Image (tube, helix red, strand yellow):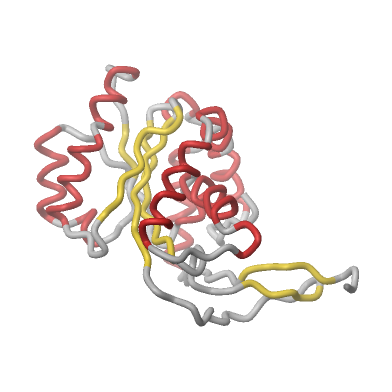
Protein backbone atom coordinates (compact mmCIF):
# COMPACT_ATOMS: atom_id res chain seq x y z
CA UNK A 1 0.00 0.00 0.00
CA UNK A 2 1.23 3.51 -0.80
CA UNK A 3 2.96 5.28 2.08
CA UNK A 4 0.78 8.38 1.74
CA UNK A 5 -2.47 6.50 2.37
CA UNK A 6 -4.18 6.38 5.75
CA UNK A 7 -7.54 5.15 7.00
CA UNK A 8 -9.84 7.99 8.11
CA UNK A 9 -13.50 8.39 8.92
CA UNK A 10 -15.73 11.09 7.53
CA UNK A 11 -16.10 14.10 9.83
CA UNK A 12 -19.40 15.94 10.09
CA UNK A 13 -18.67 19.50 11.18
CA UNK A 14 -21.30 21.73 12.70
CA UNK A 15 -21.97 24.99 10.86
CA UNK A 16 -20.60 27.96 12.76
CA UNK A 17 -21.98 31.39 11.97
CA UNK A 18 -20.16 34.54 13.01
CA UNK A 19 -22.55 34.84 15.94
CA UNK A 20 -21.84 31.24 16.99
CA UNK A 21 -18.11 31.88 16.91
CA UNK A 22 -18.39 35.07 18.95
CA UNK A 23 -20.43 33.25 21.59
CA UNK A 24 -17.91 30.42 21.73
CA UNK A 25 -15.07 32.90 22.26
CA UNK A 26 -17.04 34.71 24.96
CA UNK A 27 -17.72 31.39 26.70
CA UNK A 28 -14.07 30.35 26.50
CA UNK A 29 -12.88 33.70 27.84
CA UNK A 30 -15.35 33.51 30.71
CA UNK A 31 -14.06 30.09 31.78
CA UNK A 32 -10.34 30.39 30.99
CA UNK A 33 -7.83 29.66 33.74
CA UNK A 34 -10.49 28.92 36.36
CA UNK A 35 -8.92 25.58 37.17
CA UNK A 36 -10.55 25.18 40.58
CA UNK A 37 -13.96 25.89 39.06
CA UNK A 38 -13.31 23.35 36.31
CA UNK A 39 -12.92 20.67 38.97
CA UNK A 40 -16.48 21.35 40.14
CA UNK A 41 -18.12 20.75 36.74
CA UNK A 42 -20.16 17.67 35.84
CA UNK A 43 -19.77 17.23 32.06
CA UNK A 44 -22.54 15.27 30.29
CA UNK A 45 -23.55 14.17 26.81
CA UNK A 46 -25.63 11.62 24.90
CA UNK A 47 -24.44 9.39 22.08
CA UNK A 48 -26.05 6.96 19.67
CA UNK A 49 -24.25 3.69 19.00
CA UNK A 50 -25.15 1.74 15.86
CA UNK A 51 -24.81 -1.94 15.13
CA UNK A 52 -22.70 -1.11 12.09
CA UNK A 53 -20.45 1.60 13.51
CA UNK A 54 -20.23 4.59 15.85
CA UNK A 55 -21.84 7.04 13.45
CA UNK A 56 -23.31 4.87 10.71
CA UNK A 57 -20.66 5.89 8.20
CA UNK A 58 -17.70 3.94 6.98
CA UNK A 59 -14.09 4.94 6.84
CA UNK A 60 -11.92 4.71 3.77
CA UNK A 61 -8.31 4.96 2.65
CA UNK A 62 -7.41 8.46 1.48
CA UNK A 63 -4.23 10.22 0.45
CA UNK A 64 -2.48 12.67 2.76
CA UNK A 65 -4.36 15.96 2.86
CA UNK A 66 -7.61 14.46 1.52
CA UNK A 67 -10.81 13.81 3.45
CA UNK A 68 -13.06 10.73 3.18
CA UNK A 69 -16.48 10.94 1.57
CA UNK A 70 -19.55 10.23 3.65
CA UNK A 71 -20.46 6.73 2.46
CA UNK A 72 -23.13 4.98 4.50
CA UNK A 73 -22.60 1.34 5.33
CA UNK A 74 -25.20 -1.05 4.04
CA UNK A 75 -25.80 -3.29 7.04
CA UNK A 76 -27.70 -0.85 9.31
CA UNK A 77 -30.07 -2.59 11.67
CA UNK A 78 -30.55 -0.50 14.77
CA UNK A 79 -28.99 1.60 17.46
CA UNK A 80 -29.04 2.43 21.17
CA UNK A 81 -28.58 5.74 22.97
CA UNK A 82 -26.53 6.29 26.12
CA UNK A 83 -25.98 9.27 28.43
CA UNK A 84 -22.68 9.86 30.22
CA UNK A 85 -21.56 12.04 33.12
CA UNK A 86 -17.94 12.63 34.14
CA UNK A 87 -16.15 14.99 36.52
CA UNK A 88 -12.76 15.57 38.05
CA UNK A 89 -13.53 12.57 40.26
CA UNK A 90 -13.65 10.41 37.13
CA UNK A 91 -16.57 8.37 35.80
CA UNK A 92 -19.92 9.26 37.34
CA UNK A 93 -22.68 7.59 35.31
CA UNK A 94 -23.46 5.80 32.06
CA UNK A 95 -27.16 5.20 31.48
CA UNK A 96 -29.18 3.91 28.56
CA UNK A 97 -31.77 6.44 27.40
CA UNK A 98 -34.95 6.13 25.34
CA UNK A 99 -34.49 6.59 21.60
CA UNK A 100 -36.50 9.80 21.90
CA UNK A 101 -35.43 11.86 24.89
CA UNK A 102 -38.18 14.04 26.33
CA UNK A 103 -37.92 16.52 29.17
CA UNK A 104 -39.80 14.11 31.43
CA UNK A 105 -37.58 11.10 30.88
CA UNK A 106 -34.47 13.30 30.90
CA UNK A 107 -35.33 14.66 34.35
CA UNK A 108 -36.14 11.13 35.56
CA UNK A 109 -32.74 9.96 34.32
CA UNK A 110 -30.92 12.81 36.06
CA UNK A 111 -32.64 11.91 39.31
CA UNK A 112 -31.83 8.21 38.99
CA UNK A 113 -28.18 8.94 38.12
CA UNK A 114 -27.60 10.46 41.57
CA UNK A 115 -24.87 12.69 40.13
CA UNK A 116 -26.01 15.58 42.33
CA UNK A 117 -25.64 13.49 45.48
CA UNK A 118 -22.25 12.15 44.42
CA UNK A 119 -20.71 15.50 43.49
CA UNK A 120 -22.19 17.25 46.53
CA UNK A 121 -20.17 14.93 48.74
CA UNK A 122 -16.91 16.04 47.11
CA UNK A 123 -17.89 19.67 46.52
CA UNK A 124 -20.32 20.70 49.27
CA UNK A 125 -19.45 24.33 48.57
CA UNK A 126 -21.12 24.13 45.16
CA UNK A 127 -20.78 22.64 41.68
CA UNK A 128 -21.88 23.23 38.06
CA UNK A 129 -23.82 21.01 35.66
CA UNK A 130 -22.85 21.04 31.99
CA UNK A 131 -25.25 19.99 29.22
CA UNK A 132 -25.73 21.02 25.61
CA UNK A 133 -28.78 22.80 24.20
CA UNK A 134 -30.83 19.81 23.07
CA UNK A 135 -34.60 20.50 23.27
CA UNK A 136 -35.16 18.19 26.25
CA UNK A 137 -32.33 19.91 28.12
CA UNK A 138 -33.73 23.42 27.81
CA UNK A 139 -37.45 22.64 28.05
CA UNK A 140 -39.54 24.46 30.66
CA UNK A 141 -40.04 21.30 32.71
CA UNK A 142 -36.28 20.65 32.81
CA UNK A 143 -35.52 24.22 33.82
CA UNK A 144 -38.11 23.95 36.58
CA UNK A 145 -36.35 20.84 37.87
CA UNK A 146 -32.99 22.62 37.95
CA UNK A 147 -34.50 25.62 39.76
CA UNK A 148 -36.33 23.41 42.26
CA UNK A 149 -33.27 21.33 43.05
CA UNK A 150 -30.86 24.27 43.08
CA UNK A 151 -28.63 23.01 40.25
CA UNK A 152 -26.30 25.60 38.73
CA UNK A 153 -26.32 24.95 34.97
CA UNK A 154 -23.49 26.14 32.75
CA UNK A 155 -24.50 28.45 29.87
CA UNK A 156 -23.17 26.24 27.07
CA UNK A 157 -22.66 27.75 23.58
CA UNK A 158 -24.55 26.20 20.65
CA UNK A 159 -22.77 23.94 18.14
CA UNK A 160 -19.92 23.17 20.54
CA UNK A 161 -19.49 19.41 21.00
CA UNK A 162 -15.79 19.93 20.28
CA UNK A 163 -15.46 21.81 23.58
CA UNK A 164 -16.98 19.00 25.63
CA UNK A 165 -14.46 16.58 27.22
CA UNK A 166 -17.12 13.84 27.18
CA UNK A 167 -16.58 13.64 23.41
CA UNK A 168 -13.09 12.31 24.10
CA UNK A 169 -14.48 9.52 26.25
CA UNK A 170 -17.00 8.62 23.55
CA UNK A 171 -14.11 8.55 21.08
CA UNK A 172 -12.11 6.16 23.27
CA UNK A 173 -15.12 3.89 23.65
CA UNK A 174 -15.87 3.92 19.91
CA UNK A 175 -12.29 3.04 18.99
CA UNK A 176 -12.32 0.08 21.35
CA UNK A 177 -15.81 -1.10 20.40
CA UNK A 178 -15.38 -0.87 16.64
CA UNK A 179 -11.72 -1.86 16.40
CA UNK A 180 -11.04 -3.78 13.23
CA UNK A 181 -14.26 -2.38 11.71
CA UNK A 182 -16.29 -4.62 14.03
CA UNK A 183 -20.07 -4.70 13.68
CA UNK A 184 -22.70 -6.23 16.00
CA UNK A 185 -25.39 -8.79 15.35
CA UNK A 186 -27.93 -7.65 17.95
CA UNK A 187 -28.74 -4.72 20.22
CA UNK A 188 -28.18 -6.86 23.31
CA UNK A 189 -24.67 -7.67 22.10
CA UNK A 190 -24.03 -3.99 21.38
CA UNK A 191 -25.29 -2.88 24.80
CA UNK A 192 -23.20 -5.49 26.59
CA UNK A 193 -20.09 -4.29 24.78
CA UNK A 194 -20.83 -0.64 25.64
CA UNK A 195 -21.05 -1.53 29.33
CA UNK A 196 -17.89 -3.64 29.17
CA UNK A 197 -15.87 -0.94 27.41
CA UNK A 198 -17.14 1.71 29.85
CA UNK A 199 -15.92 -0.49 32.71
CA UNK A 200 -12.48 -0.73 31.08
CA UNK A 201 -11.99 3.06 31.10
CA UNK A 202 -10.19 4.20 34.24
CA UNK A 203 -10.87 7.26 36.34
CA UNK A 204 -7.28 8.30 35.65
CA UNK A 205 -8.02 8.36 31.91
CA UNK A 206 -11.05 10.56 32.48
CA UNK A 207 -9.18 12.94 34.77
CA UNK A 208 -6.38 13.31 32.22
CA UNK A 209 -8.91 14.41 29.62
CA UNK A 210 -10.43 16.97 31.98
CA UNK A 211 -7.07 18.51 32.81
CA UNK A 212 -6.80 19.49 29.14
CA UNK A 213 -10.05 21.46 29.11
CA UNK A 214 -8.33 24.78 29.83
CA UNK A 215 -5.99 24.27 26.88
CA UNK A 216 -9.00 23.53 24.70
CA UNK A 217 -10.60 26.81 25.73
CA UNK A 218 -7.36 28.62 24.89
CA UNK A 219 -7.40 27.01 21.46
CA UNK A 220 -10.97 28.13 20.88
CA UNK A 221 -9.99 31.73 21.64
CA UNK A 222 -6.87 31.52 19.47
CA UNK A 223 -8.93 30.15 16.57
CA UNK A 224 -11.50 32.95 17.02
CA UNK A 225 -14.25 30.51 17.85
CA UNK A 226 -13.65 28.09 14.97
CA UNK A 227 -14.04 24.36 15.56
CA UNK A 228 -11.30 22.93 17.75
CA UNK A 229 -9.99 19.75 16.14
CA UNK A 230 -7.48 17.16 17.31
CA UNK A 231 -8.07 17.88 21.00
Which residue is pictured at 40% across the width and 74% down the height?
77
The percent position of residue 56, horizontal first and vertical second, equals 49, 72
Which residue is pictured at 36% across the width and 50% down the height?
156
Q: Is residue 193 left or right of residue 95?
A: right
Q: Is residue 104 left or right of residue 51?
A: left
> Which of the two residues, 49 or 126, is positioned nearer the viewer here?
49
Q: Is residue 5 left or right of residue 182?
A: right
Q: Quadrant of residue 9?
A: bottom right
Q: Quadrant of the N terminus?
A: bottom right
Q: Quadrant of residue 149?
A: top left
On screen, residue 191 above or below 89 = below
On screen, residue 209 above or below 167 = above
Q: Quadrant of residue 108?
A: top left
How many marks do you count on the picture? 0
The percent position of residue 191, horizontal first and vertical second, equals 39, 53
Which residue is pictured at 29% across the width and 17% down the height?
121
> Which of the two residues, 197 or 141, is positioned nearer the viewer here?
197
Which residue is pictured at 37% across the width and 44% down the height?
84
> Which of the two residues, 102 or 177, is positioned nearer the viewer here?
177
On screen, residue 143 above or below 19 = above
The percent position of residue 192, horizontal first and vertical second, equals 41, 49
Amino acid sequence: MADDLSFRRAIVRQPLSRENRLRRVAFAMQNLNKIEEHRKVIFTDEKKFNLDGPDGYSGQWVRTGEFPDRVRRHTGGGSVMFWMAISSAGKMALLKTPARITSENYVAMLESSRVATIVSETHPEGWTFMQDNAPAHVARNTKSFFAREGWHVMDWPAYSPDLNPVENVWSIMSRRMYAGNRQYESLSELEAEIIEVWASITNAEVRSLLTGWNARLHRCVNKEGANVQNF
